[in-house]
Image (spheres, rainbow, N blue to C red):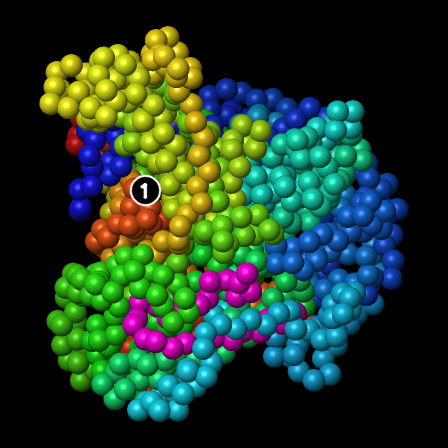
């Protein structure tokens, strides 16, 4: 492991595997998750959801529901409309129904809400709300949706005459087409990245407590972005922003699922306002899976133009995305297909052209960045699967093909064909190290011998590059809010500190790692620093935690504010040492005059002096706040090698080895980084092998519970072997790049490439995810194997 | 109907609706919110408690079925001697991230090492295969349970 520490363990700065401070409460059952919150007089809400995918609502009879003992009110779209809240904006500039008034447009859509004194009564009431549906044909694929004569799903939307949600393109079409026209070889791949769902183990929920006398709205909410949500609540509901306090308590996993604002949040808040009591809504698992933000669902055709020697000259991509009934991708405004244009991957070539269309269908809306930085997972998958296809078609070893095309270390900063400027990297070293650890040459020899015996062994490679840490204010905003983030540091007279963050953990360990950044920069021991986050009344503004942006943006803000504090402390130390500030140096937690380490002032002494003994003209106190606008994204990368054994009789494949090398720049807490990689690899394995949401022809969601939507258990999950290289980001204050999503982004292609590699000699070039045994068997069968 | 359940060593008597789930009774009736709810279909296991020492998914047992029985929740793991070895091991081995599945995972682990003082990697994985985790990829959970087993064996003088 690379040692990047500069502080002793008792200070616990960057590079130490400090044990997590979060654990103390969580291992004793003292976490405070949303459903653990109980307020005096709190009521409970249950949602009535549409059982059908597409139907006109002719009427809603609430009499039987209202008659249930304990039911206080039934909220319908009509009531919400009377308050101007039947519709709300999405994060992609569309509008979404809060409670349906005209039509239901997907199975699971919110139609009414029952408010009761206990959750059982609310559920009883919801069962008895009688909705008169006039059935309409469901459109369940984007291809049907955009076909001539397809029924209009969004008939309420002004100016909408078809089911097209958006179009987007980037790159140089003419130069790309010219490169393709002159290419020695063209390889192509058409594949579907299926609809998946983040499904954190804690579903979404809210406790809305609106005081009708004071107007104060205290909203406890499973929110990955509490500040942004506060502003959106103010804009949508017209509440004064100073009276809205969003508290995001302990979150039981997010993975992008808890970024959007869902109808349940809005209805519960409106109900609390109207009734004058707190209202709790906790989503059921089925509600979570069938109605909240899904991920992926991209139909992609990618092509590479290559020389006979395997040098890539250009890339061309045409995509169609299934957006569901409302276009509600959580993504930067400027980019309609997220950051898909990172699809040029780790390779050096001059031309690319990408176009994408999105279609409305009778499915749940979403398009959230499921553990990825806005469509980067789809992009990484496409290029890495194309590399496998090209290797098989050209007869070049897939590792060798990558080595021939890599951006070289001396080319950084490197501008890609689609305009990203990659910050740093050493791709050949990373891939070679991963190959060596896997024993690549021996594996290829074994594969050849196995094929001779009729056994199927596959070796899959993926070398991904991510674009994370959105982002620079000149380019990145969500709903108009620039994607900056913040940190406030207060050092008390005894030298203990409180750090307040605009970002919000969902298990990433911010209370530990962000304290380590302050420890690194000031010398205050990490254990002396309390981290506060998730309460908008008590933390500075920020856009929240998703898209691997906490470390690149919030972590940078933390380092910068800590540097301001350290600099003031240095000036105070100079005063105490009767020396000039420019002569003062810091060693971990002590300031001393250069060349005289014996005469020192500790950071704690300087903190005390900040409130008791200041140099003339200096303001009292040792506090500051920083808002950080990153100069660029960061670009973590990795090399993954997967070895699988495929049973030719059944199509069942088993992962024999998974070697994962990640370079996320400087690692703040190696233990936590490795934990995140383990989790990400597991989600990548899940998507490649079992985890998908499908629909029947009537739009019924198949995958509405954990018996149909398969999440891997410990039994199926492979063991992982982790490696690292450390290439710091040159523009991040501590050189960190972010890591939470790398493994989810990079690993699906490695798993699929491994299975395809096992069958490549039979002529198999593609199996769509999830690579289910029956699909493998069919691929073998149709190849005549 | 009136029931008495011994939860973490203390008798809790309550008048409950027959349809109330054990998990709701533990969380709302007894006020012990360390036991979580994740799926409604007995699939995710975050509601797992020990009933007479055996792991049970408390979303799939009625409160009245637990009448007269002993229930252990995460709040009952710690003793006067301090943390249970499984709690210490989960923290030491980084066996948790968001912490939502953790109480159940620790209880299943504790029950396993009561029966099997030195479980193999496969034995641990099989034992926790009714409990989902979305954060950790299970690697460190397995390590934590094995470390707890080793620590328990060592403190029992046979390790």
Q: Position of residue A529 (x, y in %)?
A: 37, 25
Q: Quadrant of residue A162?
A: bottom right
Q: Nearer the viewer, residue A416 or A723?
A: A416
What residue sits right under mark 1 in the picture? A733
**Residue plotted at (36% across, 53% down):** A634
- Closer to us: B44 or A316: A316
Q: Residues within 10 Å of mark 1 (few under 14, many from 20)?
A: some
Instruction: Give the residue at x 78% y 28%.
Output: A212
Query: Residue A694, how many percent across, how many down?
Result: 56, 68
- Where does residue A431 sit, x and y in percent of width and height? 21, 64
A503 above or below A622? below
Foreground residue, A373 or B80?
A373
Total count of labels: 1
Quadrant of the image occupied by residue A704:
bottom right
At a point 86% along the width and 41% down the height, the residue shown is A67
Q: Could you tell me if residue A186 is visible in this image?
A: yes
**Horizontal side of residue A386 vs A478, given as left or right:** left
Pick the residue in front: A573 or A703: A573
Residue A460, quarter of picture: bottom left
**Helix, strand, or loop for circle 1?**
loop
Residue A198 lies within the magenta run: no
Figure check: A227 above or below A152: above
The answer to whether residue B155 is visible is no
Seen at 63% across and 62% down, the residue is A327
| Magenta span contains residue A353 | yes
* Subunit bearing disc 1: A
Residue range in magenta is A334-361
């Amino acid at each position: 492991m690379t040692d990047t520490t500069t502080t002793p363990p008792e200070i616990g700065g960057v590079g130490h595997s400090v044990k997590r401070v979060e654990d103390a409460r969580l291992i004793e059952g003292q976490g405070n998750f949303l459903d653990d919150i109980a307020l005096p007089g709190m009521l409970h809400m249950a949602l009535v959801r549409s059982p059908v995918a597409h139907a006109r609502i002719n009427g809603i009879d609430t009499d039987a529901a209202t008659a249930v003992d304990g039911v206080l009110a039934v909220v319908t779209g009509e009531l919400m409309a009377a308050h101007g809240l039947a519709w709300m904006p999405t994060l992609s500039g569309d509008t979404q129904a809060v409670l349906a008034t005209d039509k239901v447009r997907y199975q699971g859509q919110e139609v009414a809400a029952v408010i009761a004194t206990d959750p059982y009564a609310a559920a009883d009431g919801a069962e008895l709300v009688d909705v008169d549906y006039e059935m309409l044909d469901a459109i369940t694929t984007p291809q049907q949706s955009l076909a001539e004569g397809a029924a209009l799903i969004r008939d309420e939307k002004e100016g909408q005459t078809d089911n097209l949600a958006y179009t987007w393109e980037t790159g140089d079409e003419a130069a790309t087409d010219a490169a393709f026209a002159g290419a020695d070889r063209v390889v192509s791949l058409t594949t579907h990245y299926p609809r998946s769902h983040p499904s954190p183990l804690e579903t979404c929920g809210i406790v809305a407590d609106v005081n009708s006398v004071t107007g104060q709205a205290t909203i406890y909410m499973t929110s990955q972005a509490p500040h942004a949500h506060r502003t959106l609540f103010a804009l949508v509901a017209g509440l004064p922003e100073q009276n809205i306090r969003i508290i995001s308590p302990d979150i039981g996993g997010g993975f992008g699922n808890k970024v959007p604002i869902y109808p349940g949040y809005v209805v519960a808040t409106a109900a609390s306002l109207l009734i004058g009591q707190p209202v709790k809504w906790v989503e059921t698992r089925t509600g979570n899976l069938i109605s909240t933000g899904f991920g992926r669902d991209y139909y992609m055709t990618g092509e590479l133009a290559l020389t006979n020697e395997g040098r890539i000259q250009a890339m061309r991509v045409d995509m169609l995305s299934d957006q569901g009934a409302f276009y509600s991708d959580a993504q930067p405004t400027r980019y309609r297909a997220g950051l898909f244009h990172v699809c040029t991957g780790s390779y050096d070539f001059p031309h690319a052209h990408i176009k994408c269309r999105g279609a409305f269908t009778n499915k749940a809306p979403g398009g959230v960045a499921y553990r990825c930085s806005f469509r980067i997972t789809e992009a990484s998958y496409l290029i890495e699967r194309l590399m496998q296809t090209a290797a098989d078609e050209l007869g070049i070893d897939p590792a060798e093909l990558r080595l021939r095309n890599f951006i070289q270390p001396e080319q950084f900063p490197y501008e890609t064909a689609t305009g990203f400027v990659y910050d740093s990297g050493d791709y050949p070293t990373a891939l070679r190290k991963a190959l060596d650890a896997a024993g690549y040459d021996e594996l290829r020899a074994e594969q050849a011998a196995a094929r001779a015996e009729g056994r199927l062994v596959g070796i899959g490679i993926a070398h991904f590059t991510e674009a994370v840490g959105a982002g620079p204010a000149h380019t990145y905003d969500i709903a108009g809010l620039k994607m900056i983030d913040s940190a406030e540091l207060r050092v008390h007279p005894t030298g203990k500190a409180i750090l307040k963050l605009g970002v919000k953990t969902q298990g990433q360990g911010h209370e530990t790692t962000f304290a380590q950044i302050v420890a690194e920069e000031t010398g205050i021991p990490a254990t002396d620093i309390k981290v506060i986050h998730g309460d908008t009344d008590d933390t500075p503004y920020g856009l929240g935690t998703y898209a691997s942006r906490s470390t690149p943006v919030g972590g940078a803000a933390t380092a910068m504010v800590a540097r301001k504090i350290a600099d003031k402390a240095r000036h105070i130390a100079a005063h105490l040492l009767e020396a000039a500030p420019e002569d003062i140096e810091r060693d971990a937690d002590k300031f001393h005059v250069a060349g005289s380490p014996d005469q020192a002032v500790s950071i704690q002494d300087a903190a005390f002096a900040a409130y008791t003994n200041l140099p003339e003209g200096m303001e009292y106190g040792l506090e500051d706040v920083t808002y950080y606008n990153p100069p660029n994204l960061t670009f973590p990368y990795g090399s993954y090698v997967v070895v699988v054994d495929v049973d030719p009789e059944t199509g069942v494949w088993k992962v024999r080895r998974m070697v994962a090398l990640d370079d996320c720049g400087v690692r703040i807490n190696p233990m936590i980084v490795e934990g995140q990689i383990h989790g990400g690899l597991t989600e990548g394995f899940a998507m490649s092998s079992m985890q998908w949401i499908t629909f029947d022809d009537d739009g019924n969601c198949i995958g509405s519970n954990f018996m149909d939507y398969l999440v891997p258990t410990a039994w199926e999950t492979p063991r992982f072997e982790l490696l690292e290289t450390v290439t710091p980001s040159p523009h991040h204050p501590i050189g960190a790049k972010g890591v939470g999503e790398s493994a989810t982004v990079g690993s699906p292609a490695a798993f699929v490439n491994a299975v395809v590699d096992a069958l490549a000699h039979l002529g198999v070039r593609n199996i769509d995810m999830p690579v289910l045994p029956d699909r493998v068997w069919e691929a073998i069968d149709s190849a005549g194997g | 109907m009136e029931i008495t359940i011994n939860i973490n060593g203390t008798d809790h008597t309550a008048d409950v609706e027959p349809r109330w789930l054990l998990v709701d009774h533990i969380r709302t009736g007894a006020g012990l919110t360390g036991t979580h709810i994740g799926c409604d279909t007995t699939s995710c296991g975050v509601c797992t408690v020990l009933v007479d020492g055996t792991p049970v998914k408390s979303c799939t047992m009625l409160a009245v079925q637990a009448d007269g029985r002993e229930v252990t929740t995460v709040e009952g793991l710690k003793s006067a001697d301090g943390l249970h070895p499984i709690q210490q091991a989960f923290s030491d081995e980084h066996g948790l991230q968001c912490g939502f599945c953790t109480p159940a995972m620790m209880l299943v682990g504790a029950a396993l090492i009561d029966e099997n003082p030195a479980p193999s990697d496969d034995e641990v994985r099989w034992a926790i295969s009714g409990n989902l985790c979305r954060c950790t990829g299970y690697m460190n959970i397995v390590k934590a349970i094995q470390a707890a087993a080793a620590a328990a064996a060592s403190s029992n003088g046979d390790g």
